[in-house]
Amino acid sequence: MNTMTTKQQIDCKTIVDFIYNSPDLPLDLRDKLAEWLLAHEHDENLGQAMSQLWDEHLQGEHGDFDAQGLQQLLGQVEMSPRRFPWGKIWRYAAAAVVAVSALAGMYKLGNDNATQQTVLLAAAGSKGEYLLPDSTRVWLNGGTRLSYDSHDFTGHSRRVEIDGEAYFEVTKDANRPFTVKMTDMEVEVLGTCFDVRNYAFSRTEEVVLKEGRVRVSTPLLSKPYTMMPDQRIVIDRSTGNISVSAESAENYCSWFQHKVRFEGVPLGDILKQVCRRYSLDLEVKPTVDEELLLSLTICNDDADDVMRAISYLAQVRYTISDNTLTVYK
């Protein structure tokens, strides 16, 4: 870990406080500060400064969550993914995943009768784990937004909406179905483990079932389809086609694990896991041998590092463009 002098420690706190208290920073100056933050991302004192900022401004007077303070921090430390690789700094800004409590899409300003909405966000390049009000566990992949309102878990049903990718381990409750709303599909379960993917950039929308059963509804089907474990259902948004296939759910449901070890695993299966892990679409050219067996370990390296290793082992080429991984012979 890098070490810092006393002056550098003071600079960390000074710069972090300056960013927080300067909402009207010019974009070029904000980018320079962002570069500084990322250049010092492994410095212990920067982490301490961001943690202190959280304690001072984001924690309510009774130790609860201060949504207005978070909103200000997000505004001051905002770095658009189109302009800057912002994912890393969020480990300090808001522990990479943040929960925003909102009332009717706005922060509470005195209307106690408003419907409270909770939004869970995973920053690009990050992952997060949450416990929902019914004890359902959910993991959010990078760039994912999950939302529900205050009445979703108090009545006869449990309902969330997802934009991105999430893996659910749903708490069983025979009297209250758990529903996940996507763009063109709706998934209803009583208690099971499954993965849903609904990124706006992707041409497909899909559900993969690991355990139990789920019922998938869509206007493209005349009646709901009941999935079995190790099945995958995909809607192609560009064509409106629906496909159901037998798949190893493990290839689609392990992206949130810190480390994944492959021992003699087919290249095609590894590529599927890589794409889930890094929120990418996958295109494999027909000349690539997807049955080639490989052994390697994936940790928290970025997608390029992982693919460079795979391309060397499998003697293939690849490109990552427009959120799509393309693999060539």
Image: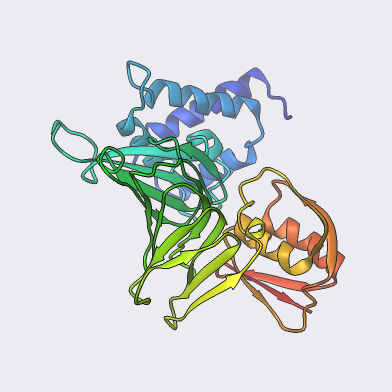
Q: Quadrant of the N terminus?
A: top right
Residue lying at 46% horizontally and 52% vertically, measured from the top left:
144
Residue 227 image offset from top left, x and y in percent: 50, 64
Residue 134 image offset from top left, x and y in percent: 39, 36
Query: Above or below — where is 282 with respect to 41?
Result: below
In which quarter of the view is residue 4 placed? top right
Query: Above or below — where is 183 with respect to 250?
Result: below
Q: Check the image and name the residue furthest to the front.
A: 174
Residue lying at 37% horizontally and 76% vertically, measured from the top left:
221
Query: Above or below — where is 318 with respect to 84?
Result: below
Residue 75 image offset from top left, x and y in percent: 37, 42
Q: Quadrant of the C terminus?
A: bottom right
Instruction: Determine if residue 256 is in view.
Output: yes
Residue lying at 44% horizontally and 28% vertically, measured from the top left:
17
Give left or right: position of 266 versus 180.
Answer: right
Give left or right: position of 43 versus 204.
Answer: right
Residue 324 image offset from top left, x and y in percent: 59, 70
The foreground one among 37 and 54 is 54
Residue lying at 61% horizontally and 54% vertically, measured from the top left:
253
In which quarter of the view is residue 291 placed? bottom right
Instruction: Determine if residue 83 is in view.
Output: no
